[in-house]
Amino acid sequence: GTGPAGDVRSLQSAAPGADARPRPGPPLWLLAEVTYRCPLHCVFCYNPVDFAHHDAELSTEDWLRVLREARAAGAVQCGFSGGEPLLRDDLEVLIAEAHRLGFYTNLLTSGVGLTEQRAAALKAAGLDHIQLSFQDSTRELNDFLSHTRTFDLKQKVARIIKDHGWPMVMNCVIHRLNIDYIDRIIEMADSLGAEYVELANSQYYSWALLNRDHLLPSREQLERAERITNDWRATHDNRMRIFYVVPDYYENRPKKCMNGWGSIFLTITPDGTALPCHTARMLPGQAFPNVRDVSVADIWYRSDGFERYRGTAWMQEPCASCDEKEKDFGGCRCQALMLAGDANATDPVCAKSPKRGVVDEAVARAQRPGNPAVHPLVFRDPKESHRLTACEP
Ligand code: FES
């Protein structure tokens, strides 16, 4: 899966005054996180650390209704993600309905479970696009980082994707442990016939935040990787598009997370909770509606959870008087909570944040060669999820 995205233009016109609240545009991008179950155990997984507490999955009927309601509310793109979405054996049914409704459909997968038969069924269902994730260019590191033997399988799946005529879109999360092999990762993507490769540095949420001391690269590593990526582009006539993203910790302005809270993204978690981003459920004192009880239109246009951080009226200083507030909307609410302890605060990535020191300290630690981390790598796993988060009785 991918983390918070920001490359889509907002269709919402900027509010002229702090209190002006224009009706938001439609939820253009629907992300259906159909399951948190996953055969992999990636150390940078963006699923919430407490995912194992939310294992009551929506039924096929519920998902079909969600798709219809979201399409009626104006959604045009539908991503099927997880966990590993192929673990749902009704995935073909859901994708067929999304296709029939006129969605552009995208499957985000580790490849585990994408057999010839299922690929044919997904093609028949009208699936438009598959994004296949890798962990590294070598079997050793791929299998270590995911804690599974999946490297060979992914090579096979890449061929199946090509054979069925889908564009080959690969994603490899980049971090301290694989960034020095970025040249080999690019070569591998090219040799598999990728049209597009996303080399996005891990963002520090959820499991990646737990493992941050192991994963945050040094400035030198990042600069080298960027140089290699640019060289490859220049010498290969851009035959494969490479999208390279640095960790926001190395920026001095925050990202416009999710393109703005409640502006285009709607995530439905496996149990039906509707969220403006993958991890918003962690925000304290903030309730989010469930599609079992509330319609998608009411969730999007009228729920408190989606209204909470829309626009700029909620901001405190230094955001409130910042002339860039419409540009990044104060950054990420989840990151503000995780790093500044306050979801209403300026995202500490911003150099204007009084809490920027927290980010600088993590960056400073990442420059040390040995970089002793306080604990060993934690692999994403239901047992670890229960160990790390208290069970509600
Ligand atoms: Fe940025 Fe939640 S991940 S607002």
Image (cartoon, rainbow, N blue to C red):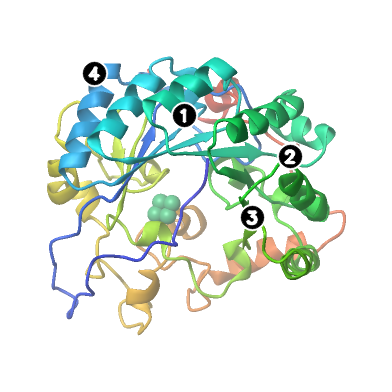
- Viewer-proximal residue among 132 and 246: 132
What label does residue 296 carry, if any?
none
Distance Cα–Cα, label 3 vs label 4: 37 Å
What label does residue 375 carry, if any?
2
Distance Cα–Cα, label 2 vs label 3: 21 Å
**Amino acid type for the residue under numbered disc 2:** His
Query: What residue sits right under mark 1 in the picture?
Result: 51
Mark before the other along the chain sequence, 2 or 1:
1
Closer to the observer: label 4 or label 1? 4
Mark before the other along the chain sequence, 4 or 1:
1
- Structural crowding at the residue carrying mark 1, measured as other residues with C-alpha within 10 Å and reported as few (<14), some (14–19) or many (≥20): many
Q: Secondary structure at mark 2?
A: loop
Mark before the other along the chain sequence, 2 or 3:
3
Q: What residue appears at the point 30 percent right and 32 percent down from the top-left corner?
A: 98
Q: Secondary structure at mark 4?
A: helix
Give the quadrant of residue 208: top right
Q: Quadrant of the C terminus?
A: top left
- Viewer-proximal residue among 84 and 160: 160
**Amino acid type for the residue under numbered disc 3:** Asn
- Structural crowding at the residue carrying mark 3, measured as other residues with C-alpha within 10 Å and reported as few (<14), some (14–19) or many (≥20): many
Mark before the other along the chain sequence, 3 or 4:
4
Q: What residue appears at the point 83 percent right and 61 percent down from the top-left corner?
A: 368
Residue 127 relative to residue 190: left or right: left
Residue 126 % position (x, y): 38, 31
Distance Cα–Cα, label 1 vs label 3: 22 Å
- Structural crowding at the residue carrying mark 4, measured as other residues with C-alpha within 10 Å and reported as few (<14), some (14–19) or many (≥20): few
Mark before the other along the chain sequence, 4 or 2:
4
Q: Are marks 4 and 2 in contact (CB under 8 Å)?
A: no
Query: What residue sits right under mark 4 in the picture?
Result: 61
- Viewer-proximal residue among 278 and 225: 225
